Image (cartoon, rainbow, N blue to C red):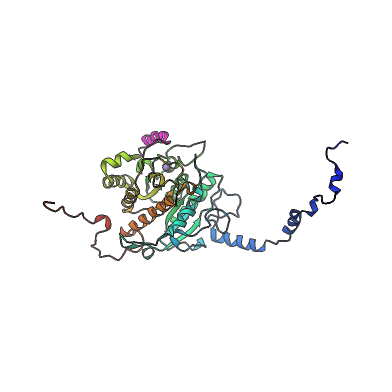
Amino acid sequence: MGSGRDERADEREGAVRREDLRGTWAMAREAELSGARAKELAEQAKLHGLDAAASIRDRSLTLFRRGRWGPGAGGTFSGVPFLEDMRQLGGQDVAFVGAPLDAGTTFRPGTRFGPEAIRRISTLGGSYNAGWGIDLKESLDMIDAGDIQVIPANLEKSFDQIARAVGYIHERGVFPVVLGGDHSIGYPDIRGLAPYIDGNVGIIHFDRHSDLTESTYDERMHGSPFFHATNIPNAPATNLVQIGIGGWTGSKPGMRVARERGATVITIEDIERYGIERIMEFALSVAWRGARAVWLSFDIDSVDPAFAPGTGTPEPGGLLPREALKMVRLAAREGLAGMELVEVSPPYDVADITALLGGRVIMDVLATLIEARKLGRPPVARPDEPTADEVPAPEPQPGG
Ligand SMILES: [Mn+2]
């Protein structure tokens, strides 16, 4: 007996035979499915989702994901219409687009689910703000472009896709709102935008972390976006202003780069010392100095983890939500070329509060752009009527 197996076992009654397996039957059935409908849908997706970046070898993949499995299959931001056919982009004011990537996270992942979570909770409430008398849907023509087809295990291919997508949206004259995704997308967002700007691009960057490290684990991870963005000739570090920096997480190499390149770092203590208005006036002067356009990069971890726990690199001691919202409204008042909202990681979130705050940052920015007459149709208001931020404080009463 050479074999340890008794071959007669296969002939016993009730023995399992390969040809009787349901799996064998299913393999045979698979050949009978023509796949004609799937092919038809794939061809339609190719037309509607546009051609992928040159580095993507599988040419069935598109630039904007259409009809594929994966995160981001939920609703649209604030219930705005989904633009299926991206060839029809143009003439709208705002395009929301997801970059569901977490390949750039160095520790806690999950931001690939950020766009989906922000969109889902964004439908809580409407588009009207009772404090400012603005209805986003009355003043802006907004669409949701769905998600950019990122490559989950390849940062550089994902960057090619994101840069191409942001460039396309900007080229079509539409304001891009990029829903992250980890902060590594900050680099391709600027790379996509910069070629279309006839002059320098400034960057207003809210974060607890400096994000100016050349690489982590040999790759351009989420601590690296502004090292590479400010290597782009018309996005100089001298127009980069970082707000909310501090704490104990990973900023040391970035501080050296900031010093060497002349970036501006504003710590939480600076904000406490000078106050929000003066700090933001200064930040705007840095970002706009000789620049033609300014990009807003908002990392949700700039807000204290008590209010924004759903993020990969929480750092206690950050901004309060009311401070952050006030600051982005001041940041947006001179206009923006686009924005990204990054680092929302739903698996670490509690009761959707981080995703909700992310959506509110976006809505407050859009409302400010309307008020400042930088985007869309102005709200119904007398031309001489002051905006919310300009209403003077009441005079102190004598003897009070
Ligand atoms: Mn951060």
The reply, left or right, for residue 39 in relation to residue 291 is right
Total number of numbered discs in the rendering:
0
Farthest front residue in view: 13
Q: Which image quadrant for residue 30?
A: bottom right
- Ligand 1 resides in the quarter of the picture at top left
Provide residue 361's location: percent of width, then percent of height: 38, 53
Observer able to see residue 100: no
Provide residue 351's location: percent of width, then percent of height: 44, 51
Provide residue 161's location: percent of width, then percent of height: 52, 50
Farthest left residue in view: 399
Span of residues in magenta: 247-263
The reply, left or right, for residue 28 in relation to residue 76 is right
Residue at 87% from the left image edge and 36% from the top image edge:
2
Q: Is residue 193 on the magenta stretch?
A: no
Viewer-nearest residue: 5 or 354: 5
Residue at 83% from the left image edge and 40% from the top image edge:
5
Q: Is residue 261 on the magenta stretch?
A: yes
Viewer-nearest residue: 54 or 123: 123
Provide residue 202's location: percent of width, then percent of height: 36, 47
Farthest right residue in view: 1
Viewer-nearest residue: 197 or 222: 222
Viewer-nearest residue: 81 or 6: 6
Observer able to see residue 162: yes
Quadrant of the frame with the N terminus = top right
Residue at 25% from the left image edge and 64% from the top image edge:
383
